[in-house]
Image (cartoon, rainbow, N blue to C red):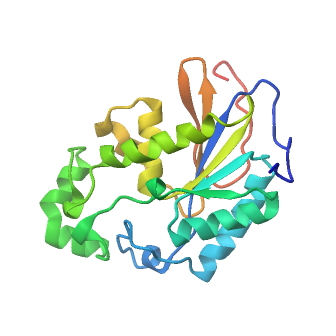
């Protein structure tokens, strides 16, 4: 189904574009609890964030939407679907990192109980946080989903991927060809903010990161 804003926000010859959009706020976000694959719903604030962001993203004329099947992502995606008329494809491979016993713990509790493990993760070492998934395993499952949906786009099409902060970061790192130990340098995404990848001559390029407003064009020698 074509989006209601088809053609909006497009530049001829721009190439394919992927918008990776993090879900809105949950109660566990506010409490700084590690959610992982726990299925926590949006707060009222989170729903409002999704509605505001959806209006901005709809103006970019997305051609397709794919979402994690967890409630917080699916509810976020539904706001964009309502504006564009696009159907949302759900895929459990876009879920957040499974983090075992870390899930449900606050940031302070994780540092107190699993401080050495946390520090090793921050140093970029391959760590199964809480006995869960490695970051590379998250990228192994999520990045192919993105690429599979990108292949279905028109030449100048835009895909919106609605997912989770950790999954988005590892997917970006994989698509950019960065070494896993450098993925942390990308930084996190705020609730309902997004990052944009564009198809370039030598692969994917990071065009925006942790954005929450409509982008300005890159004008200069590096555009």
Quadrant in which residue 114 is drawn = bottom left
* Residue beneath the point at 81% across and 31% down: 11
> Foreground residue, 66 or 40?
66
> Foreground residue, 93 or 121?
93
Q: Compared to 33, does 216 lie above or below?
A: above
Residue 188 visible, this orientation = no
Quadrant in which residue 42 is drawn = bottom right
Residue 26 visible, this orientation = yes
Q: Quadrant of the C terminus?
A: top right
> Foreground residue, 53 or 167?
167
Q: Is residue 120 left or right of residue 148?
A: left
Count the numbered circles shown: 0
Q: Is residue 150 left or right of residue 219?
A: left
Residue 191: percent from left, percent from top? 55, 64
* Residue beneath the point at 70% across and 30% down: 218
Q: Is residue 153 left or right of residue 43?
A: right
Q: Compared to 70, does 66 lie above or below?
A: above
Q: Is residue 197 left or right of residue 178?
A: right
Residue 17: percent from left, percent from top? 66, 36
* Residue beneath the point at 57% across and 80% down: 43
Residue 25: percent from left, percent from top? 54, 72
> Foreground residue, 43 or 111?
43
Q: Compared to 223, does 30 lie above or below?
A: below
């Amino acid at each position: 189904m074509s989006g209601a804003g088809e053609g909006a926000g497009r530049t001829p010859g721009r190439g394919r574009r992927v918008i990776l959009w993090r879900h809105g706020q949950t109660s566990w976000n506010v409490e700084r609890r590690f959610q992982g694959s726990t299925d926590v719903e949006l707060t009222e604030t989170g729903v409002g964030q999704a509605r505001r962001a959806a209006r901005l993203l709809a103006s970019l004329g997305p051609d397709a939407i794919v979402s994690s099947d967890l409630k917080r992502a699916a509810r976020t995606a539904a706001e964009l679907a309502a504006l564009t008329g696009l159907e949302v494809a759900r895929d459990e491979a876009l879920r957040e990192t499974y983090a075992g016993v870390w899930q449900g713990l606050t940031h302070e509790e994780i540092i107190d109980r699993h401080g050495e493990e946390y520090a090793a993760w921050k140093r970029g070492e391959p760590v199964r946080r809480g006995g869960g998934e490695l970051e590379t395993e998250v990228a192994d499952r999520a990045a192919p989903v993105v690429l599979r949906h990108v292949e279905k786009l028109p030449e100048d099409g835009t895909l919106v991927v609605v997912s989770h902060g950790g999954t988005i970061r590892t997917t970006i790192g994989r698509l950019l060809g960065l070494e896993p130990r450098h993925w942390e340098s990308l930084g996190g995404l705020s609730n309902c903010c997004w990052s944009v990848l564009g198809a370039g001559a030598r692969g994917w390029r990071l065009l925006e990161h942790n954005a929450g407003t409509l982008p300005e064009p890159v004008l200069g020698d590096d555009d």
